[in-house]
Image (tube, rainbow, N blue to C red):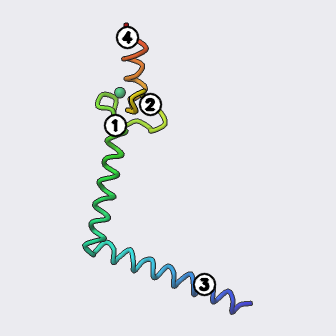
Amino acid sequence: MSAIILEVLALLAGITGITMLVRAGASRTRPGVRLQQEANRRAIEQRAALTCPIHGLQAEETLVRLPDGGTLCAACYQEALVDHPPS
Ligand SMILES: [Zn+2]
């Protein structure tokens, strides 16, 4: 029984070690750096899409989906369409 536990622990340690080596290697190689830069770009684009120029960063679930597919923050929607309805 204890041999099985030791084998499982050795397997987990091996998997952890390999994962750490892959992560360390990926951050130092050219493709790894490129992947990290693309991930940074996606994060910045995601944050920009959630940021209203007037009201700042908004939670994704509070945005209003417009008929044309764009999004608007709830405060801007309130001001533009409810307080000043189109005539
Ligand atoms: Zn807004």
Image quarter for ligand 1 equals top left
**From the viewer's perspective, is the residue at label 3 or at label 1 nearer?**
1
User: Please, what secondary structure does the residue beneath circle 1 have?
Assistant: strand
**Gap in angstroms between the C-alphas marked 3 and 4:** 67 Å
- Residue at the farthest bottom position: 3
**From the viewer's perspective, is the residue at label 4 or at label 1 nearer?**
4
**Nearest to N terminus: mark 2 or mark 4:** 2
**Nearest to N terminus: mark 1 or mark 2:** 1
Residue, disc 4: 86
- Other-residue count near label 2 (Cα within 10 Å), few / some / many at <14 / 14–19 / ≥20: some
Residue, disc 2: 65
- Residue at the image position 39 percent from the left and 80 percent from the top: 21
In the picture, the quarter occupied by the N terminus is bottom right
- Residue at the image position 31 percent from the left and 72 percent from the top: 27
**Marking on residue 9:** 3
- Residue at the image position 34 percent from the left and 37 percent from the top: 51
Nearest the viewer among 37 and 9 is 37
**Quarter occupied by residue 84:** top left
- Other-residue count near label 1 (Cα within 10 Å), few / some / many at <14 / 14–19 / ≥20: some
The correct choice, above or below, for 74 with respect to 24 in the image is: above
